[in-house]
Image (cartoon, grey):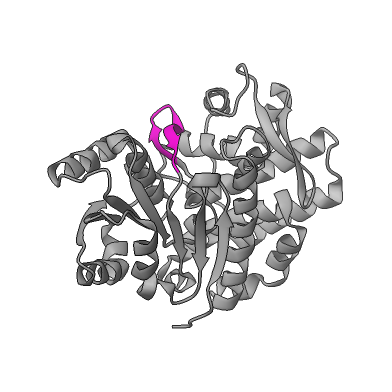
């Protein structure tokens, strides 16, 4: 596999600052970086993963930690969004208590966004907070979920409703692991990359247009470039607005409807990025209806989203139930629907209240 030099991106948050390290081949040397950021008194480190990912990549950090005198343990969860629950978190809490993990010890999230979110949530709340490290193995986690300290589990009434802000000590990104990523997972993550292009990076947007075939062929240099662009964008946004009180809300482009679609289908029908794909299309159409974005830019955004793959069917989904779920979303204000809406490729507006009849009309077209 390819190896590249390491790119170091800093998330600047005073005493909670940390680095995102990005390099093809970094995984095999990641333990050296981990030991620099954890407590010198740390002895036990629990690697949280799922069976598939741990089988592929878990032995590398586990064996290297053992060589350095640590006691590496592992806890495996089910694969998929339906396992990102309080019930799974409770099982992990029980494991940590039984293994007598102390506040100086640490967790490692080795996996995609579900593993990272769950591990971060447990790390934020076990003993009122212990250290954790993110080693994301999916493109979606590498560009988004592993960065920024938003940790959460789902509730049957909505996605990510139970959570906390708890920053990792380090994020380690090795694009080589994307070789084993299923195609559907790769494509679903591309929709989140498109999000970054629309909200903040026109150059990235047109790169996705131009290099579609090479991206789908998993060109590691190209994927590394994309990951670096997204991580730089998110690191900057998080550094300026850690708790999503202002600018960070732009990262929710496509998520108001996206989260509702995931919730209404019990997290079984859509990959997160696919639901966000629909959400971006809908938000762009809403923006066009409100005369905030012109027809040409609207066409470009929708064409790029639809161009990477056919999105799963939304046939049979109740519009009224979907709207009710959206009203319960944590991004709603006083029960009114608010959206992040594009004005042009590379720029969006946040907190835009949208009349319910406009949302209903757009959802009907989907």
Camera-side residue of 324 and 246: 246
Q: Residue 151 versus residue 361: which sits nearer the camera?
A: 151
Up-down relation of residue 317 to residue 345 (above or below): above
Q: Residue at 70%, 56% (x, y): give it.
A: 197
Q: Quadrant of residue 228?
A: bottom right
Q: Is residue 164 magenta?
A: yes
Q: Quadrant of residue 31?
A: bottom left
| Residue stretch rendered in magenta on the structure | 151-166
x and y percentages locating residue 84 in the rendered image? 35, 41
Q: Residue at x 21, y 62 (%)?
A: 70
What predominant SS class does the magenta segment belong to? strand
Q: Residue furthest front?
A: 40
Which of the 4 image quarters holds residue 54?
bottom left
Front residue of 140 and 294 = 140
Give the percent coordinates (x, y) of residue 321: 52, 25
- Residue 312 in view of the camera: no
Image height check: is 29 above or below 336?
Answer: below
Most extreme residue toward the top is 334
Q: Nearer the viewer, residue 231 or 278?
A: 231
> Could you tell whether 11 is left or right of 201 in the image?
left
Please state the horizontal and vertical placement of residue 32, each as a whole percent of the image. 36, 70
Residue at point 27% right, 40% down?
Answer: 88
Q: Could you tell me which quadrant the N terminus lies in?
A: bottom left
Q: Quadrant of the C terminus?
A: top right
Residue 327 in the image, given as x and y percentages of width and height: 57, 23
Q: Residue at x 65, y 43 (%)?
A: 240
Judge whether residue 42 is colored magenta. no
């Amino acid at each position: 596999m390819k190896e590249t030099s390491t790119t170091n991106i800093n998330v600047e948050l005073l005493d909670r600052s940390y680095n995102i390290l990005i390099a093809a081949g970094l995984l095999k040397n990641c333990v050296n970086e981990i030991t620099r950021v954890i407590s010198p008194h740390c002895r036990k480190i629990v690697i949280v993963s799922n069976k598939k990912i741990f089988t592929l990549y878990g032995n590398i950090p586990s064996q290297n930690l053992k060589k350095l005198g640590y006691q590496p343990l592992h806890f495996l969860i089910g694969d998929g969004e339906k396992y990102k629950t309080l019930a799974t978190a409770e099982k992990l809490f029980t494991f940590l208590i039984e293994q007598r993990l102390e506040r100086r010890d640490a967790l490692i999230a080795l996996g995609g966004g579900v593993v990272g979110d769950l591990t971060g949530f447990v790390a934020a709340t076990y003993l009122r907070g212990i250290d954790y490290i993110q080693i994301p193995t999916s493109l979606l986690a590498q560009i988004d979920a592993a960065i920024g300290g938003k940790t959460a589990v789902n509730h049957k009434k909505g996605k990510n409703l139970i959570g906390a802000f708890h920053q990792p000590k380090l994020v380690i990104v090795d694009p080589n692991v994307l070789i084993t990523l299923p195609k559907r997972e790769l494509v679903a993550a591309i929709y989140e990359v498109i999000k970054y292009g629309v909200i903040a990076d026109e150059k990235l947007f047109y790169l996705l247009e131009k290099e579609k075939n090479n991206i789908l062929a998993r060109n590691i240099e190209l994927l590394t470039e994309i990951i670096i662009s997204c991580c730089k964008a998110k690191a900057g946004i998080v550094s300026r607005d850690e708790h999503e009180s202002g600018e960070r809300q732009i990262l929710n482009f496509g998520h108001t409807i996206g989260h509702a679609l995931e919730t209404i289908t019990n997290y079984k029908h859509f990959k997160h990025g696919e639901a966000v794909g629909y959400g971006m299309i809908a938000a762009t159409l809403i923006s066009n209806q409100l005369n905030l974005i012109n027809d040409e830019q609207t066409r470009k955004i929708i064409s790029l989203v639809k161009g990477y793959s056919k999105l799963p069917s939304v046939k049979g989904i109740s519009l009224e139930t979907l709207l009710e779920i959206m009203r319960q979303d944590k991004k709603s204000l006083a029960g009114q629907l608010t959206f992040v809406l594009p004005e042009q490729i590379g720029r969006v507006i946040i907190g835009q209240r949208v009349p319910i009849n406009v949302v209903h009309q757009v959802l009907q077209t989907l």
